Image: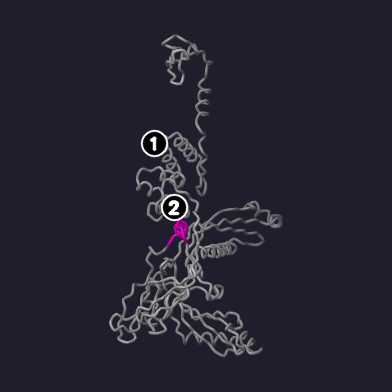
Amino acid sequence: MCAVPDAEMLCPKCNQTMTYDSAAALYRCRSCGHRIEKPYESLEQAAERMKASRPPRPFVPITHRGTVELRARTLFELAQDSLHQQNKAEAIRQFKKAIEMQRDFTDAHLWLAKIADTEAEQRNHLSEVLAHDPGHGEAIRMMMALNGRLKGTQTGSINTAYPETEEKTTSEPVATTTQTLICPVCAGTLTTDPVNQRVVCKFCGHEENLAPIGIPNERVENLSMALIERSSQPVRWRIGSRMLKCKNCGSARTIPATKLSDTCPFCASTHVILQDALATITQPDALVPFTVTEDEARAAVHKRLQNFDQRVAGFFGENRIANQNFEGVYLPFWMFDVLMEVRITITEKEDNWNDRRNYRAMRPAYQSFTMQDGETGLAVPGFTTPEPALALELGDFDYEPMRPYEPKLLARHAAELYNVDFDKASLEARSLCSKRARARAQREYKHGENEVNASALPLQMTFTLVLLPVWMVTLIERDGDVRPALVHGQNARVALGKARPAVW
């Protein structure tokens, strides 16, 4: 006989604990001898009773990109069972065993990061996740929390859903902090030498020190991290104008929110905005200097207007050019580098099978596979004026002479501030790079009568804010219509817009 005490079974007569007699299948009270019979319970029934007494383990989806080996998946499920039973040590052992089976199993790394005891272990496993899946949202949020970019967020229970960010608009001019571009020696006006790209004083010849050409790696931002960080901010401001106070002569004026630099109309000093009172400005990361002078830009526009299509248009009405205005401006572009996963499906047409039976036997009629592709230096306009479509007609820029942004580089040419933010620009970048990836797949795999379909999914996107050189041109026709044009600041390529009636 095996007597097992049951703390939940008390004697109804003397209220003392009763013991269970497994051979007789009854409870006995040692104090008064009272007995209570209980039906026999098998081990299977006991297991089912214990299982029913616990709440079911919640379903944990596997987010790993690609195939998960069967043994690794089984160990992952066993580890989740151990966590449900609050056996952390056993769960860690099973997660690690799953990684031994499949090194790139991101879900096992992620859960080891969640239950790790030290920050070093968390970073190690999160780095493994991001190495295999750079766009993993939950791993990115956990890493950002470890790095202090998500204030007050607990790394062990991060919610991947973005919180709501309130948008506010102000019609009042917002105060700014600026840098005045004057010579530190004689207080004269600074300018940029277009030949050797030096910043010099017009009067005394003083030369400013500039950072070397090249973009520091730390200036490149991960799109997923930037979106998560932005969504964690409680307020996002939309402003219409800023207040700029001249440090040289003391005058104050209101400038549009799209201006990054401006010249004082009273003392001709140049001011570059560093930040405003609501902290709405992201400073540019880099700048590509002008190599095309105003005279070269004028000559390029004149040559373009002499083309046959433009000369024919000038024969009708008063469409010939009466006046031209040129202004060199650094326009803001969001420059993206994109890593994509492209899924390609190739289908042979049925009439081809009948004509080439041997070919059909050698190669399946339907193929589907994935590959990685990417885009670098994809420039998306960060402005709405001039027309972004017109700006894209200028073509690509040469980024080799790009240098880290410094306000003093705007000594000769003004700069615009973006009004299309990186989150909206990233949608255009996704569309452009997906379109190009599909086109490349068509060129490479389209043979004969087969059909090629391709879909692209961005895995990782990084971006920088770059100022690119553009000559903005206003062409005034004899009938008073105004026609915009842009000239590439590096190769003098011209993009002509459509004429519109002047608005006074």
- Residue holding disc 1: 89
Question: Which residue occupies 52% across, 16% down?
Answer: 40
| Residue 341, position as x, y percentages in the image | 53, 56
Per the rendering, the mark at residue 141 is: 2
Above or below: residue 20 compared with residue 503: above
Q: Please identify the residue farthest to the front as the structure is shown.
A: 172
Above or below: residue 353 compared with residue 265: above
Above or below: residue 228 compared with residue 297: above
Q: Amino acid at mark 2?
A: Arg
| Residue 294, position as x, y percentages in the image | 46, 85
Q: Nearer the viewer, residue 419 or 444?
A: 419
Question: Which residue occupies 48% across, 78% down?
Answer: 470
Position of the C terminus by quadrant: bottom right
Q: Amino acid at mark 1?
A: Ala
Q: Which residues are magenta?
A: 221-235
In the rendered image, which quarter is residue 30 located in?
Answer: top left
